[in-house]
């Protein structure tokens, strides 16, 4: 039997690559006896005409709903399945419902997807995300001193009041602001307006210093998980999978991770690294719908109009030694996912 992973590299409209998609693939790979290739999640599922294969079908469906349902040559395990609200009408067509019923129960990454499927007569349950299982292979007992800030949020407006605050902060902390401004992995502003970038950097420093220690802000390694870098430096799906593995190993040995990326926060839970999730206050429905059920697994700091509001009790500032302990509720989800994936592979072995 062939086993393949899902990839997203062929989607024509993407300007970069979200390495989080490959972190999801990495989680699935832990349970497969071998990797015989990749199938593009958004471009190749319906028209796949290769060797019959088994695929763990976790992830976000789908940017191109016309490429659904998948080929009969794909034997799927539906866990950590997400239907985005923007395309849900296309994906609950009669053909889609028939297809999903033939592979139920469907493990859903979020509660919204679960409820949508149940309303259409499909047996579904909340599974959480496959990345919660990354501790199966990547959990490390060696926690170093390294801390990571992965795609931090800052959504404050550049009004006159904030501009004056930014200038004031820059005058009193010029070296810190300059260091952050030069950090290519800290992406608070998109575009070539260097003045706006400098002002936002100063405001980021001011607000994050209110909640987090200066040492965390200035000495953490910054990581951007979605950019052209992953598209230009890692040409193949296998290369990107290896880069995803490198990042997961870094997170597994970290003492603390602060992130706005669910596919950084969830993996950190899975490898049992302390993690704080930064939640954007003004998320549109398409983004909010994917968090239902997952948000409760995290220690959350809400970011709204440039203001950070911890959703947990703690004495600030947050430091490497003063941070909330990860919740435990993710572990039951991870264990169920592991059992379903092992059974999926074991059934082939038993049939031989």
Image (cartoon, rainbow, N blue to C red):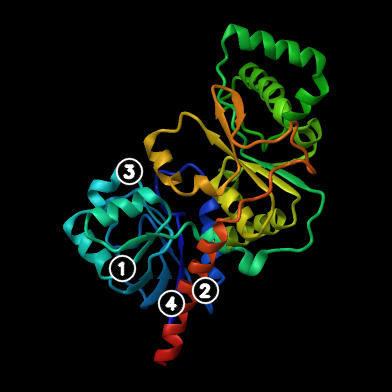
N-term-proximal mark, 3 vs 4: 3
N-term-proximal mark, 4 vs 1: 1
Q: Residues within 10 Å of mark 3 (few under 14, many from 20)?
A: some
Residue 256 horizontal side relative to residue 122, left or right: right
Q: Residues within 10 Å of mark 1 (few under 14, many from 20)?
A: some
Give the quarter of the figure containing the N terminus. Answer: bottom left
Q: With respect to residue 74, does 332 lie above or below? A: above
Q: Which mark is residue 344?
A: 4
- Of residue 333 and residue 345, the one placed in the foreground of this image is 333
Task: Say which of marks 3 and 1 sits in front.
Answer: 1
Task: Say which of marks 1 and 2 sits in front.
Answer: 1
Residue ID at (62%, 35%): 152
Query: Which residue matches tag 2?
Result: 35
Secondary element at image label 3: helix
Query: Which residue matches tag 1?
Result: 104
Residue ID at (80%, 19%): 174
N-term-proximal mark, 4 vs 2: 2
Q: Residue 6 carries which label?
A: none
C-beta proximity under 8 Å, tags 4 and 2: no
Give x and y (percent) for residue 197: 63, 22
Task: Say which of marks 4 and 1 sits in front.
Answer: 1
Give x and y (percent) for residue 237: 53, 61
**Residue 74 position by quadrant:** bottom left
Secondary element at image label 4: helix
Q: Which residue lies furthest to the front in this view?
A: 313
Q: With respect to residue 338, does 83 lie above or below? A: above
N-term-proximal mark, 3 vs 1: 3
Q: Distance between the residues labelled 1 and 2?
A: 24 Å
N-term-proximal mark, 1 vs 2: 2
C-beta proximity under 8 Å, tags 3 and 4: no
Q: Distance between the residues labelled 4 and 1?
A: 13 Å
């Amino acid at each position: 039997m062939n086993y393949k992973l899902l990839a997203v590299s062929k989607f024509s409209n993407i300007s970069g690559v979200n390495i989080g998609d490959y972190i999801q693939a990495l989680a699935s790979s832990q349970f497969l006896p071998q990797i015989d290739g990749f199938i593009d999640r958004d471009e190749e599922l319906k028209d796949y005409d290769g060797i019959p294969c088994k695929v763990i079908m976790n992830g976000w469906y789908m940017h191109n709903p016309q490429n659904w349902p998948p080929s009969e040559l794909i034997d799927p395990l539906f866990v950590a399945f997400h239907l985005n609200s923007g395309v849900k009408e296309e994906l609950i067509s009669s053909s889609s419902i028939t297809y999903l019923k033939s592979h139920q129960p469907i493990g859903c990454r979020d509660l919204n997807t679960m409820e949508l499927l149940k309303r259409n007569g499909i047996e579904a349950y909340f599974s959480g995300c496959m990345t919660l299982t990354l501790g199966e292979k990547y959990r490390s007992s060696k926690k170093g001193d390294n801390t990571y800030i992965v795609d931090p949020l800052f959504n404050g407006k550049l009004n006159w009041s904030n501009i004056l605050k930014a200038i004031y902060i820059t005058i009193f902390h010029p070296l810190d602001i300059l260091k952050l401004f030069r950090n290519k992995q800290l992406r608070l502003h998109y575009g070539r307006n260097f003045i706006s970038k400098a002002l936002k950097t100063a405001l980021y420093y001011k607000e994050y210093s209110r909640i987090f220690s200066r040492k965390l802000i200035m000495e953490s390694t910054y990581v951007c998980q979605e950019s052209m870098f992953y598209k230009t430096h890692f040409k193949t799906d296998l290369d990107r999978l290896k880069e995803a593995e490198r990042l997961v190993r870094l997170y597994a040995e970290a003492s603390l991770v602060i992130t706005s990326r669910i596919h950084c926060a969830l993996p950190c839970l899975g490898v049992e690294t302390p993690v704080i999730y930064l939640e954007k206050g003004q998320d549109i429905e398409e983004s909010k719908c994917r968090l239902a059920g997952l948000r409760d697994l995290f220690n959350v700091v809400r970011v709204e109009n440039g203001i950070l509001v911890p959703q947990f009790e703690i004495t600030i500032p947050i430091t490497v030694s003063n941070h909330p302990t990860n919740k435990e509720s993710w572990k039951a989800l991870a264990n169920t996912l592991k059992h379903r994936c092992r059974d999926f592979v074991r059934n082939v072995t038993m049939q031989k």
